[in-house]
Image (cartoon, rainbow, N blue to C red):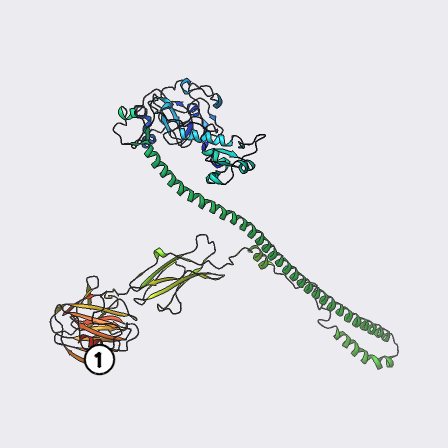
């Protein structure tokens, strides 16, 4: 009930409706609020105003209302009125709901709902007054009847009264003697409210009372009629009650409207019947709306669950991110310690080398200085013989010592600079590029069944990603089985979402599925789709593989040749499974050439008679007889030839691996060839004296049943 409260409030004053009237746009407004938002237009007559005043307002012609609309969409309120007048000079007011309200030219006293005067005592409506709906902004010029021309919404008024009464006070038990307790149930048959003790004492569930229906107090209060039913009267004839319904105008009317008014020629129906009909229509519409409301509630539950999951996933993801960053920081600290250890080792190594060199150089300098002092003392000796006795040895020692201070001895063995440079640029760049990457495989694609189909021996499949999936997809993998329940195999890998697979077997059932992949891996398969290829083959001659001398017409169904030599043309479809039958009608034949009919491999010779090489199996025929030929070997000469109008049939049965021929619906000779397997194309060879028309999609001849041991015997 509380959810209905907004529907029971006036859009202008924001309070519950008081004497509501129905505007032509089907919206409601209080009668006093309607007077408050009236605007007076200029006296000058215009085609629109004269048209509005000359026609009855009760017609509710929405198309005319749109044409007469005085509301300007360029303004945010009601201050612009088309070509009639500029914005009113009186200041606008705002209702509790925020609707802009312009008072009339002569503002009446502000209406108070608790002191609302009778409509008959209200001041008269100025001429050419205009009212604009505060909800849909449609405007209408009033006629001489003013606001009385709008019907009163008695139903809405009754709903408001019942709603206000249901909320007035808590329902009390009607049988408590002192200080009545709050009622817990109401008996619809007794029309009495009971508390639990009074119900057990005065209304026990036994005997005749056991069949009474007990309902909650609020429901019982709504269903109870607290006031007599108000009888609606006609807006044009106030003394007449509404008793009929005008179908054309869609409004209740009285008998006087039918006899004297504009509804006399309109279709009318009984008010009670239309009341029941519209109630039923409203109930049906409410059922649909109720379903939508149920779906909306379920959707809100889903969204609230998503909010909870997002919060949980957000906390988990933040924790994971912090853990990953902390792991990177720990790794960087460990690497920092390793690098500092290397610097310490280099530092110790440099100091050791320099200290060793200092020690070595100090010892040599001490030896050199001692030698120098000794030599100076020897030079001071005045005894020539004694000096000469040791001078040679001293000279050698001085030269030897001097040579020990040779090149490189007085050069530092180690530099003071550290030859270690930390290259942190790539790591800094990597840190700056540190970002989230897609680490999830794609979801399973959805096969679009309405776009998947088979045609002849081709299958077209279409798919898409789930609507809410945001995972990146690099491509798709389409798989089909072999048409006989075997293993799946890949037939397409790429980025497209539609694929046509050609060259399938006829009359076969294929299973297909598709999956998506990205850098993280391959996702799940879609649902398996079962597709059936055509039971019967439809094909034409293939101009792309035909000899250049071949001439095709009739949508590649009729063929002839421009050369006197035999030339080969093949069908556009190859067969490797099933039973297939096609015919060729001889359109032109002069009894001289020998056309050949049969099947061939894709690489058959095109400039010789069919069957001359080992890539073709054929029957060539003249006007009297025929031969079977393969690899230039002639076998099974049979009487009976062809003429203009004759029909040559070819039956290829892969279940038994045989090929046989028919002329004019009768088998020509025995089985022509056996143990056929692989891929074969229909083929013929002919020259310019022959013209043939192909017929495909034909049923198997009646005489032939696949699997029989001797089809030739069945002809006899």
Establish if 335 lies above or below 394: above
Residue 133 seen anywhere in this rendered image of the structure? no
Return the residue found at the far left: 590
The x, y position of residue 152, in whole percent, is 39, 27
Q: Residue at x 42, y 58 (%)?
A: 445
Establish if 1 lies above or below 512: above
The C terminus sits in image quarter:
bottom left
Could you say which is closer to the camera, residue 129 or residue 233? 233
The x, y position of residue 142, in whole percent, is 35, 24
Left or right, residue 592 beside residue 660: left
* Other residues around mark 1 within 10 Å, as few (<14) / some (14–19) / many (≥20): some
Left or right, residue 84 beside residue 342: left
Establish if 62 lies above or below 431: above
Return the residue found at the far right: 382
Left or right, residue 394 beside residue 686: right
Could you say which is closer to the camera, residue 214 or residue 316? 214
Please, what secondary structure does the residue beneath circle 1 have?
loop
The x, y position of residue 8, in whole percent, is 45, 32
Left or right, residue 393 beside residue 20: right
The residue beneath circle 1 is 632
Q: Quadrant of residue 411?
A: bottom right
Establish if 692 lies above or below 172: below
């Amino acid at each position: 009930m509380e959810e209905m409260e907004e529907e029971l409030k006036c859009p202008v004053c924001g309070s519950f409706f008081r004497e509501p009237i129905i505007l032509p746009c089907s919206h409601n407004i209080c009668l006093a609020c309607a007077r408050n938002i009236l605007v007076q237009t200029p006296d000058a007559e215009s085609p629109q105003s004269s048209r509005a005043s000359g026609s009855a307002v009760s017609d509710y012609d929405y198309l005319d209302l749109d044409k007469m609309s005085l509301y300007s969409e360029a303004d945010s309120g009601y201050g612009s009125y088309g070509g009639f007048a500029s914005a009113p000079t009186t200041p606008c007011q705002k209702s509790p709901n925020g609707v802009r309200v312009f008072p009339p030219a002569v503002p009446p006293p502000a209406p108070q709902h608790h002191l609302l005067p009778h409509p008959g005592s209200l001041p008269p409506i100025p001429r050419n007054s205009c009212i604009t709906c505060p909800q849909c902004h449609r405007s209408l010029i009033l006629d001489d009847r003013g606001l009385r021309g709008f019907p009163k919404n008695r139903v809405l008024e009754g709903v408001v009264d019942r709603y206000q009464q249901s909320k007035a006070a808590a329902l009390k038990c009607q049988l408590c003697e002192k200080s009545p307790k709050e009622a817990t149930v109401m008996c619809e048959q007794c029309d009495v409210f009971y508390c639990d003790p009074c119900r057990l004492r005065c209304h026990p569930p036994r005997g005749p009372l056991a069949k009474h229906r007990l309902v909650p107090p609020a429901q019982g209060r709504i269903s109870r009629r607290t006031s007599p039913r108000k009888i609606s009267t006609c807006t044009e004839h106030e003394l007449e009650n509404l008793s009929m319904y005008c179908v054309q105008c869609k409004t209740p009317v009285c008998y006087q409207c039918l006899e004297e008014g504009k509804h006399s020629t309109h279709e009318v129906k009984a008010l009670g019947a239309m009341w029941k009909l519209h109630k039923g229509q409203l109930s049906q519409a409410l059922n649909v709306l109720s379903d939508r409301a149920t779906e909306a509630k379920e959707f809100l539950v889903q969204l609230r669950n998503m909010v909870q999951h997002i919060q949980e996933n957000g906390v988990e993801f933040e924790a994971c991110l912090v853990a990953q960053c902390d792991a990177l920081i720990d790794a960087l600290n460990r690497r920092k310690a390793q690098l500092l250890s290397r610097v310490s080792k280099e530092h110790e190594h440099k100091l050791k080398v320099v200290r060793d060199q200092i020690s070595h150089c100090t010892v040599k300098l001490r030896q050199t200085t001692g030698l120098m002092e000794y030599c100076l003392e020897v030079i001071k000796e005045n005894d020539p013989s004694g000096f000469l006795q040791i001078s040679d040895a001293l000279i050698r020692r001085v030269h030897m010592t001097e040579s020990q201070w040779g090149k490189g001895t007085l050069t530092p063995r180690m530099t003071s600079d550290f030859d270690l440079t930390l290259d942190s640029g790539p790591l800094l760049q990597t840190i700056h590029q540190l970002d989230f990457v897609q680490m999830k495989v794609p979801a399973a694609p959805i096969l679009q069944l309405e776009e998947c189909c088979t045609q002849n021996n081709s299958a077209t499949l279409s798919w898409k990603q789930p609507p809410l999936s945001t995972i990146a997809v690099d491509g798709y993998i389409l798989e089909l089985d072999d048409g006989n329940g075997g293993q799946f195999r890949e037939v397409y890998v790429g980025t497209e979402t539609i694929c046509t697979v050609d060259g399938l077997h006829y009359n076969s059932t294929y299973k297909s599925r598709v999956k998506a992949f990205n850098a993280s891996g391959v996702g799940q398969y879609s649902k398996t789709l079962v597709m059936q290829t055509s039971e019967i083959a439809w094909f034409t001659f293939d101009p792309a593989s035909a000899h250049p001398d071949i001439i095709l017409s009739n949508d590649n169904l009729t063929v002839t040749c421009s050369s006197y030599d035999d030339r080969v043309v093949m069908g556009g479809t190859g067969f490797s499974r099933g039973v297939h039958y096609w015919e060729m009608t001889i359109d032109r034949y002069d009894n001289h050439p020998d056309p050949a009919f049969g099947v061939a491999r894709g690489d058959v010779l095109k400039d010789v008679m069919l069957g001359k090489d080992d890539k073709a199996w054929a029957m060539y025929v003249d006007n009297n007889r025929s031969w079977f030929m393969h690899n230039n070997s002639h076998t099974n000469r049979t009487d009976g030839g062809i003429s203009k109008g004759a029909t040559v049939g070819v039956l290829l049965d892969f279940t038994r691996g045989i090929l046989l021929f028919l002329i004019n619906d009768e088998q020509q000779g025995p089985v022509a060839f056996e143990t056929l397997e692989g891929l074969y194309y229909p083929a013929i060879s002919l020259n310019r004296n022959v013209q043939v028309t192909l017929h495909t999609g034909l049923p198997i001849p009646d005489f032939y049943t696949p699997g029989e041991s001797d089809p030739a015997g069945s002809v006899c």
